[in-house]
Amino acid sequence: MFLLRLLSYFVPFAVNFLQGGFFFITSYRFAEAGCSGVVIGGALTAWGAAYCLVTMITGRLANISNALKFILSGGGILTLSSLGFIIFSGVYTQFLWLFTAGVGAALFCAPFQLFAKSIESGSNESHGTVWATSFYTMTWSVGFASGPLAFARLSVRSGFIVTLILSLAVVISVLLIAFRRRNGAGSRECAASDAVAAQAGQTEYPEKYFTRLAILGWIVGGLGTVTICQLRSMWPKLGSDLGIARYHVAYVLALVSYAQALTALLLCRSRNWMCRRFPSLLMNVPGIAALLIFAFAGNTCCFYLAALLYGIYSGCMYFYLVYHSLAHPVRNSFFVAGNEVIVGVTSMLSPFIGGMLLDISGRSNAPFIFAAAVILLALAIQWLILKPGSSSEDRL
């Protein structure tokens, strides 16, 4: 069981190492080449378009039984994407390989969350959901942090060789997991998860209670993803304009993800803050503060502080999003797939919006001001929907 879990959580680390490295180096290469804000933002838009389209298909087909097949397919496509970056290294051909990487990531993300829940669930469904949410968020966050660090210190070609090796490791790991599952390891956990799902009607809360929170998670997570897309796509441009060294730009992005990972890990002991009004509202505060620091600070130390604060916010926000989808007793696969569609749509549109704001205003901090306002909007929506005495049927 320990080996199964170790291999399982290596996979999101490796996949998101690739994604974080791809996003950082492509945005930085576009900025270094003097491309417009729309082109820089288009790097994430290309990825998001593929991710969204493929996730909509995957969400209708994936379940616990076939999840590993989707994950294996995603690993294979990410291998091809890494090869493409190495062989065809032009600036604008990056769009093609980002699109391909988006396909691979879409085949992985939603199926893996269902798989993670199956290996963590036992007699206590709530406990299993919290642990799956925490460990999944922690491992993919560490991967996202490590990718930019690798590209900051290695040559571009060497960085892509590392991603190729990791994508092959993903394929091998999934094959080993499938072999162990076929030989009985983890079958008890999967059976326990299925048994809990079969008893969904016996929960003490009505299904509409979980549906309301899952939809709220979509809203909060979607708006939060808008802001993190602004940060990931526009921070290299802001850092370049301020004359900050490339390794500092990468370290700031890495700190965001490491803080996000540590926050998610600490949330593994969560009980019910995700369903309570005040803690849910409070999680937005460090995000707003961080984005305002990014927008108006000019000191490198301030940017590191902003990265730490934003990581705390994003760790809570992604935990909030994933937990409420996995916790749904009947339609968790639907809501998990919805998470990924929302991430895909926002990843496709919001960098483009950020690039337009940058080009129209001529100010590199404009996307960060916009992002702070978006989190404030998310806070206002939570305040209204979670207002004491409000009716879920009236609100949603």
Image (spheres, rainbow, N blue to C red):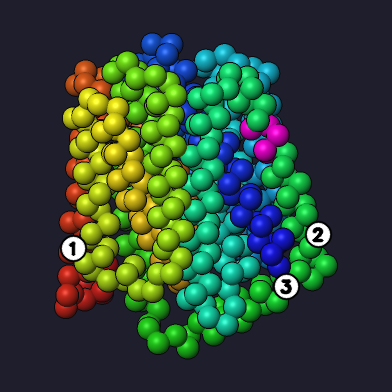
How far is the residue under mark 2 from the one under mark 3? 12 Å
Residue drawn at the location 58% of the way across and 22% of the way down: 154
- Residues rendered magenta in the picture: 163-167
Which element is circle 3 on? helix
Is the residue 271 above or below the residue 72 in the image?
below
Q: Earlier in the sequence, mark 2 or mark 1?
A: 2
Residue drawn at the location 53% of the way across and 37% of the way down: 146
Q: Amino acid at mark 2?
A: Phe
Whether residue 288 sits left or right of residue 5 in the image: it is left
Q: Amino acid at mark 3?
A: Ser
The residue nearer to you, when weighing 230 against 100, is: 230
Q: Quadrant of the N terminus?
A: bottom right
Check disc 1: other Cα within 10 Å, few if <14, some if 14-19, many if 20+: some
Q: Which mark is residue 179?
A: 2
Q: Earlier in the sequence, mark 3 or mark 1?
A: 3
x and y, in percent, of residue 48 in the image: 46, 38
